[in-house]
Amino acid sequence: MAAKTLPARTLWLLSVCAFSSMASMRVCDSLLPVLAMDFSTTVGHAARVISSFTLAYGVLQLFYGPLGDRYGKMRIIGISMLACTFGSVGAALSVTLDWLVVSRILSGAAAAGIIPLAMAWIGDSVPYESRQGVLAQLLGATVSGMIAGQWLGGVIADIFGWRTAFSILALLFLTSGLIFVSRGAHFPLHPPGQTRSLIARTLDVLAVPWARVILGTTFVEGALAFSALAFIPTHLHTQFGLSMAAAGGVAALYGAGGLVYSRFARALVHRLGEANLARLGGVCMAFSFGTLAWATSWGWALPACTVAGFGFYALHNTLQTTATQMVSEVRGTAVSLFACSLFLGQSLGMFVASWLQDNFSATVIFAVSALGLLALSGYFAIARQRTLRGA
């Protein structure tokens, strides 16, 4: 039977991977105005560097999950870490926006094999009643990576230029990847998984009604939450005149809110239950994005970003935990489909949000996200209560 906790070294190594992956994902949030200026384009057009990453990240989930099930999740994570180095080097050397977009596609394709497979491995190793707490610890590293990407990305760009941010990421991936590979033998590997086809395993997941609810909810969550998050630094910069470093620092409070959640996740789950925790997340995000939409000074963004981060992870960590138990026989495939839904949703959300940014303003993006996330969390909470009653 699986242990209820993981060895500290194992969780630390997985956390390093999660930190690096999320820092790469969010680094461009604070760079959009600078990239738009350097490449003589609009902020909405420059946002392709975000949507291209997330699209590749989402699509490649369809392949990494089955690879992890078949060849071992830890082995695939290690290879993915080293492969991320090449995309970051390409981004640092980009001379055109199209070159940068292609480099971000490579980064997203490589990073796709890290966090979801780490979640699936935890799902294999930790029983369900203890799993949300362990996933919350991994979440802490993920959120720290988000903070580093959003805030330090802007700081480094202001001081040294945006190319330096990608150079540092390349070094981070190379170093952490080598550490992971050198110590990977210490990971207890689960037996190689299914040899059935990708289509067969995907159909196994989609045949479960509750899995379809989780995947659909996750898709909409990604479209609404991540697209709004990506435009917070730009909104603070253009609307209130904050430097990109300062705007990125304020937006990074979103991650700080997530860290607060990760510290209290076990107690919150025990006290509220999954359905009410999801509801709380939706209310927090609706309040926060509504505040950002109608704020008259940048100071309102400080509590708004913090509460939004807490709310997002209250909902998302609940979705993560339920996703690891959708279809345990093909857990790697199931969790990868979960991540695929999240980031394909984000890609669609970024496409729509970029159009709204160029034709209206970020205020419209925040307002739509606030209303949508409130309704979404309520729907999921009701669905979860029904499944628990029927269990």
Image (cartoon, rainbow, N blue to C red):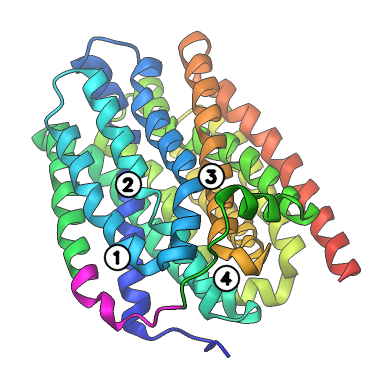
Left or right of 162 on screen, residue 286: right
Q: Nearer the viewer, mark 1 or mark 4?
A: 1
State which mark lies toward you, 4 or 2. 2
Q: Amino acid under label 4?
A: Ala
Write down the residue under mark 2.
110
Q: Position of residue 17 (x, y in %)?
A: 32, 62
Contact between labelled residues 1 and 2, with CB atoms less than 8 Å apart:
no
Disc with the residue nearer the chain's start (2 vs 1): 1
Q: Residues within 10 Å of mark 3 (few under 14, many from 20)?
A: many
What's the magenta region? 180-190
Residue 181 in magenta stretch:
yes
Disc marking residue 265: 4
* Residue at point 69%, 77% (across, down): 270
Label 4–label 3 contact, CB within 8 A: no
Q: Between residue 190 and residue 350, name the one nearer to us.
A: 190
Quadrant that contains the N terminus: bottom right
Q: SS class of the residue under badge 4?
A: helix
Secondary structure beneath disc 1? helix
- The CA distance from mark 1 to mark 3 is 22 Å
In-image side of 234 versus 290 (left or right)? left
Residue at the spot of label 1: 16
Q: From mark 4 to mark 3, how far is it between C-alphas?
A: 24 Å
State the residue at coordinates (19%, 48%).
Answer: 85
Question: x%, y% of residue 275?
Answer: 76, 61
CA separation in Å, label 4 and label 2: 30 Å
- Res. 340 mark: 3
Q: Amino acid at mark 2?
A: Ala
**Of tags 4 and 3, which is closer to the observer?**
3
The mark nearer the N terminus, 4 or 2, is 2
Q: Position of residue 315 (x, y in %)?
A: 63, 55
Q: Residue sitting at 22 percent across and 69 percent down?
A: 181
Q: Nearer the viewer, mark 2 or mark 1?
A: 2
